[in-house]
Amino acid sequence: MASRISRMRERIEELERTFAFRWDADMRAIKRWQAAHPGNDLVWPDHADMVVWLLEEHDKREEALKAAFAFLNPRPGCEEQMASPLSRANLHRMLREALSL
């Protein structure tokens, strides 16, 4: 009986840790969503919509980082792109967007 109670307590602790982990992650995501949607400080987005938004944000950042990597590591014969001020401005903008929180 005592071992069963011990296992049940361990299971409860595991579930509480899991809940706390998920809750913290949701709160961080909601704060990011609210920051990106001014005027919605008191709004909690639908979870599925928030996940789609987070994935879209991730994809944007990933594309910007890929573009920055390609810019900083040009293929042989494409070195002239490093000298282009427009490309440098685009790189700066893309990295700023990719790294924004």
Image: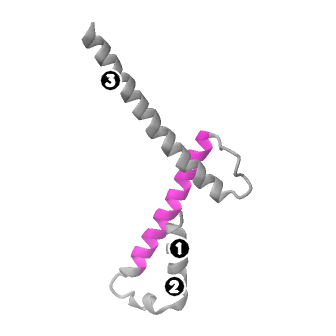
The chief SS type of the magenta part is: helix
* Residue 13, above or below 28: above
Residue 75: % across, % down: 35, 81
Q: Amino acid at mark 3?
A: Glu
What residue lies at 43% left-to-right and 30% top-to-bottom? Answer: 16
| Contact flag, marks 1 and 2 (Cβ < 8 Å) | no
Name which of mark 3 and mark 2 comes first in the sequence: 3
Residue position for label 2: 87
Q: Tell me the number on the disc at residue 10.
A: 3
Q: Nearer the viewer, mark 1 or mark 2?
A: 1
Q: CA distance from mark 3 to mark 2?
A: 56 Å
Q: Quadrant of the N terminus?
A: top left
Q: Callout 2, which amino acid?
A: Ser
Q: Which residue is mark 1?
A: 96
Spatial CA span between label 1 and label 2: 14 Å
Residue name at image x 34 percent, y 17 percent: 8
Q: Position of residue 90 (x, y in %)?
A: 54, 80
Q: Out of 91 and 42, give the one closest to the viewer.
A: 42
Corner quadrant of residue 76: bottom left
Q: Residues within 10 Å of mark 3 (few under 14, many from 20)?
A: few
Which residue sits at x=43%, y=69%? Answer: 66
44 or 51, nearer to the observer: 44
Where 56 falls versus 61 (above or below)? above
Q: Secondary structure at mark 2?
A: helix
- Mark 1 or 2, nearer chain start: 2
Looking at the rendered structure, the kind of residue marked 1 is Arg
